[in-house]
Image (tube, rainbow, N blue to C red):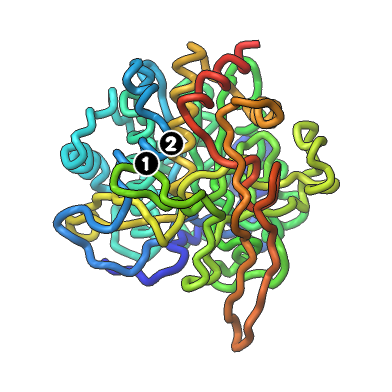
């Protein structure tokens, strides 16, 4: 199916964020929680990806290949040493999943001569998945799942992929984040992986007052020494703005999205990489910002829910009293997308982009660091900011571009001013991007201390 440029979003219809979270934790009877939740505003959770308008082709076309992305991030020296994710697991959380992901990953691997992952485990800890129907909602999440699985696998080819599918139903109006919390707690309880990749989010302002913090249970557990799981999340695809609760219109002032804004989560922003066919840069990386597809740019900004965490104290002049987003950035541009293979909407190759691309790329990098450290690293934000303050850390500063967006809405033109990429930390690219050959061993060594 050809999709128009724009957010391929899944409206999860999560009206029950606070009440159902409490019910899931055993604090409130589910029927009572549901009645209360139905009186709350809807919170829409959607995947952070974009599908440029293009044909579905019989062979890869137009997008970056695994070889190019691996070269761009200097992965090959690690892979030659056997640092390939062996013994590690990457947990990918997606609503609904894709009905064809096992087959599609095999085709992807065969095309690019990639070894299969040690295994692809698919679980439904929050309930069975409804039968697939080709609605825009289900197609959007299937694209998201395909991107997440195929490109996390590119970065850590021998890691096990644990795909956690949740049974989100927009018709019920009472699902979404609570099911994700349930699923992620299950992952922790059963020690299924050292890194969780989340390529979805909802604008902070869409959560009714007091309903977001109860949903942090999975991240609090991930940070406990007993679990020590790293959680990464996409920073958003609409630059300095993001969707209102209707998942159709945008805020006309700067906003940011959760869970990327959570201090216990590593927020991953997006860059525009310009590479030759061998993956060598032909220009410095810049903030992903595609004005032709507005608003279409790397998410970033200041949280209105969370105060400045201690790891950002040195950047108080930038973030003020707020948690700043993102922390790190990787490839996401729709001008230079990546290839995926999918067969849920007719078999073929497609190009795809967004911070949903950047997030599984970085999750794969964390799996490599877990392998080097011989244990999962847990929350890494404090380590990232320490590394960025030293030389030869493998963190590469980005100083080009911005995430200001201009768009038309309700017959008017709006500009939401974001932030420029500048030396040091900024609210467009975070600390910058990475050179994996240096970053992976340095992060692993720092996390051991």
Question: Along the line of sight, which residue is nearer the eye, 252 or 331?
Answer: 331
Secondary structure of residue under mark 2: loop
**Residue drawn at 36 percent across, 47 percent down:** 147
Q: Residues within 10 Å of mark 1 (few under 14, many from 20)?
A: many
Give the spatial CA distance, label 1 vs label 2: 6 Å
What percent of the width, then of the height, locates residue 137? 40, 61
In depth, the one of 380 and 68 nearer the eye is 68
Identify the mark at residue 73; answer none if there is no mark: 2
- Quadrant of the image for the C terminus? top right
Tell me where residue 245 sits by quadrant.
bottom right
Q: Is residue 79 left or right of residue 19?
A: left
Q: Residue at x 68, y 70 (%)?
A: 416
Instruction: Determine crowd level at label 2: few under 14, some 14-19, many 20+ residues with C-alpha closer than 10 A.
Output: many
Q: Is 248 located above or below residue 71 in the figure?
A: below
Q: Is residue 366 left or right of residue 431?
A: left
Tag shown at residue 69: 1
């Amino acid at each position: 199916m050809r999709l128009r440029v724009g957010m391929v979003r899944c409206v999860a219809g999560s009206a029950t964020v606070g009440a159902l979270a409490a019910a899931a934790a055993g604090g409130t009877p589910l029927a009572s929680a549901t009645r209360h939740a139905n009186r709350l505003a809807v919170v829409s959770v959607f995947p952070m990806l974009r599908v440029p308008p293009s044909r579905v082709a019989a062979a890869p076309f137009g997008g970056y290949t695994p070889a190019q992305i691996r070269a761009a991030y200097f992965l090959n020296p690690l892979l030659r040493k056997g640092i390939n994710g062996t013994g590690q697991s990457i947990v990918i959380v997606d609503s609904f999943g894709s009905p064809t992901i096992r087959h599609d990953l095999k085709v992807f691997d065969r095309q690019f001569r990639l070894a299969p992952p040690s295994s692809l485990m698919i679980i439904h800890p929050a309930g069975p998945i409804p039968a697939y129907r080709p609605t825009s909602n289900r197609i959007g999440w299937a694209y998201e799942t395909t991107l997440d699985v195929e490109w996390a696998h590119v970065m850590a080819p021998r890691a096990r992929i644990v795909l956690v599918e949740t049974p989100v139903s927009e018709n019920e109006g009472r699902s979404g984040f609570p099911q994700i919390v349930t699923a992620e707690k299950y992952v922790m309880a059963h020690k299924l992986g050292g890194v969780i990749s989340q390529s979805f989010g909802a604008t902070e302002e869409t959560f009714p007052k007091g309903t977001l913090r109860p949903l942090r249970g999975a991240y609090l557990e991930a940070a406990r020494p007993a679990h020590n799981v790293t959680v990464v999340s996409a920073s958003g695809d609409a630059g300095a703005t993001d969707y209102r609760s209707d998942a159709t219109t945008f805020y006309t002032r700067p906003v940011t999205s959760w869970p990327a804004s959570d201090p216990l989560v590593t927020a991953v922003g997006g860059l525009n990489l310009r590479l030759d066919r061998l993956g060598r840069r032909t220009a410095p990386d810049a903030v992903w910002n595609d004005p032709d597809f507005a608003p279409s740019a790397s998410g970033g900004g200041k949280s209105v829910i969370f105060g400045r965490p201690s790891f950002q104290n040195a950047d108080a002049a930038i973030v003020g009293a707020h948690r700043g987003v993102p922390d790190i950035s990787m490839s996401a541009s729709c001008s230079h997308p990546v290839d995926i293979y999918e067969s849920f909407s007719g078999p073929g190759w497609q190009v795809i982009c967004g911070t949903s691309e950047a997030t599984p790329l970085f999750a794969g990098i964390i799996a490599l660091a877990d392998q080097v450290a011989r244990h999962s690293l847990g929350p890494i934000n404090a380590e990232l900011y320490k590394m960025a303050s030293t030389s030869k850390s493998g963190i590469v500063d980005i100083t080009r571009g911005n995430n200001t967006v201009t768009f038309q809405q309700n017959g008017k033109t709006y500009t939401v001013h974001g932030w420029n990429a500048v030396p040091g930390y900024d609210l467009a690219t975070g600390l910058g991007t990475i050179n994996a050959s240096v970053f992976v061993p340095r992060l692993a060594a720092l996390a051991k201390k």
